[in-house]
Image: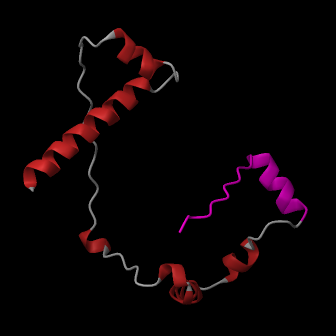
């Protein structure tokens, strides 16, 4: 079954204007007036949150490793393919290489 998507983007100014017109579905005053127990109860009653428990005692923060500087030769048409979309082309090249590495690791583990 195809997933229905309807993504709408608003600027900060548009969101403020919607709030001023009463078009916002958020009720900040009501939320601010809730106790911690009421907030926890509302979260527990939300079907989207069912079964979602986070054990913060086991959480860790892993800092990303710095990227290595690399000077390599690639075919011009390959470089132009990635550069044609503008900024971020090196990140895209890295993502393609990472995908390849992950597929090779997955294949080797089977």
Q: Residue furthest right?
A: 21
Q: Quadrant of residue 32?
A: bottom right
What number of labels is visible? 0
Seen in the picture, residue 4 relative to 38 is either above or below; the reply is above
Location of residue 71 in the rendering, given as x and y in whole percent from the top left corner: 24, 13
Front residue of 54 and 98: 98
Position of 49 compared to 108: left or right?
A: right
Q: Where does the image place residue 101, in percent across and percent down from the top left?
A: 20, 39
Q: Residue at x 53, y 84 (%)?
A: 47
Compared to residue 4, the image places residue 106 above or below, namely above
The residue positioned 57% from the left and 83% from the top of the image is 39
Residue at the (53%, 69%) spot, across then down: 1
Q: Which is nearer the eye, 87 or 41?
A: 87
Give the quarter of the image for residue 53: bottom left
**Residue 37 rendering spot, x and y as whole percentages:** 54, 89
- Residue under the image location 55 percent in, 64 percent down: 2
Comparing 48 with 76, the one in front is: 76
- Picture coordinates of residue 38, whole percent (x, y): 59, 89
Q: Which quarter shows the C terminus?
A: bottom left
In this picture, residue 72 sits left or right of residue 49:
left
Part of the protein shown in magenta = 1-21
Scheme of colours in the image: secondary structure
| Residue 15 forms part of the magenta stretch | yes
Nearest the viewer among 69 and 8 is: 8
């Amino acid at each position: 079954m195809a997933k229905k998507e309807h993504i709408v983007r608003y600027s900060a100014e548009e969101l403020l204007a919607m709030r001023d017109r009463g078009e916002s579905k958020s009720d900040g005053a009501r939320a601010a007036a809730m106790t911690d127990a009421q907030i926890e109860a509302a979260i527990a009653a939300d079907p989207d949150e069912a079964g979602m428990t986070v054990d913060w005692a086991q959480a860790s923060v892993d800092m990303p490793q710095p990227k290595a500087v690399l000077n390599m030769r690639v075919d011009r048409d390959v470089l132009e393919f990635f550069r044609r979309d503008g900024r971020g082309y090196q990140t895209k090249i890295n993502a393609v290489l990472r995908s390849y590495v992950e597929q090779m690791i997955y294949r080797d583990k089977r």
